[in-house]
């Protein structure tokens, strides 16, 4: 789950700084869970949302979210049946990497 908590830095309004969003990502795969304190760009989130919508509307497809800071790289695969799978890698604030994979019916 990706949550947008605010702008980075707070109060920024111009295109370059105002489009950085503090967006912690909660990852859960089986017994593994983690929160990655990600900073994502508004256009990265918009593109990912549009790709997901197209994948679900077209009964299958891919959506990819790769952060500019290279802390998050997720690929969602949607099957024709509606089943989805998310795979990728995330790097936490200390620089530790986790590789995750989760399938849902």
Image (cartoon, helix red, strand yellow):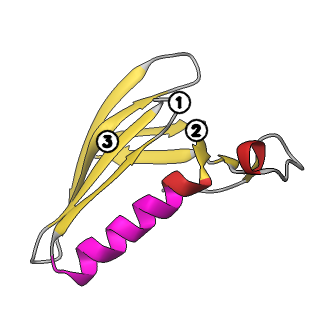
Residue lying at the far top of the rendered structure: 95
Residue 40 seen in the figure: yes
Residue 16 to residue 63: above or below: above
**72 in magenta:** no
**C-alpha span from label 2 to label 3:** 22 Å
Tell me the SS state at disc 1.
Answer: loop
Point out residue 78 in the picture as x, y percentages from the top left corner.
Answer: 19, 66
Residue 104 seen in the figure: no
Name the residue located 53 percent from the left edge and 30 percent from the top edge.
Answer: 69
Residue that numbered label 2 is attached to? 38
CB under 8 Å between callouts 1 and 3? no
Q: Main secondary structure of the magenta part?
A: helix
Residue 30 to residue 36: above or below: below
Point out residue 12 in the picture as x, y percentages from the top left corner.
Answer: 85, 47
**2 or 3: mark nearer the eye:** 2
Point out residue 71 in the picture as x, y percentages from the top left corner.
Answer: 48, 30
Is residue 53 toward the left or the right of residue 59 in the image? right
Labelled disc at residue 80? none
Tell me the SS state at disc 2.
Answer: loop
Residue 30 to residue 104: above or below: above
Quarter where residue 81 is shown: bottom left
Labelled disc at residue 31? 3
**1 or 3: mark nearer the eye:** 1
CB under 8 Å between callouts 2 and 1? yes
Is residue 102 toward the left or the right of residue 40 in the image? left
Which stretch did the figure color magenta?
Answer: 45-59
**C-alpha span from label 2 to label 1:** 9 Å
**Which quarter shows the C terminus?**
bottom left
Q: Nearer the viewer, residue 24 or 13?
A: 13
Q: Nearer the viewer, residue 1 or 51?
A: 51
Is residue 91 toward the left or the right of residue 31 in the image? right
**Mark earlier in primary sequence (2, 3):** 3
């Amino acid at each position: 789950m990706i949550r947008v908590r605010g702008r980075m830095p707070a109060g920024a309004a111009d295109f370059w700084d105002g489009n950085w969003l503090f967006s912690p990502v909660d990852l859960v795969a089986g017994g593994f869970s983690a929160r990655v304190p990600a900073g994502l760009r508004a256009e990265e989130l918009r593109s990912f949302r549009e790709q997901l919508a197209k994948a679900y509307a077209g009964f299958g497809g891919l959506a990819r979210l790769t952060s500019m800071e290279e802390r998050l790289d997720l690929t969602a695969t949607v099957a024709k049946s509606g089943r989805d799978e998310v795979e990728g890698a995330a790097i936490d604030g200390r620089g530790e990497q986790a590789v995750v994979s989760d399938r849902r019916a």
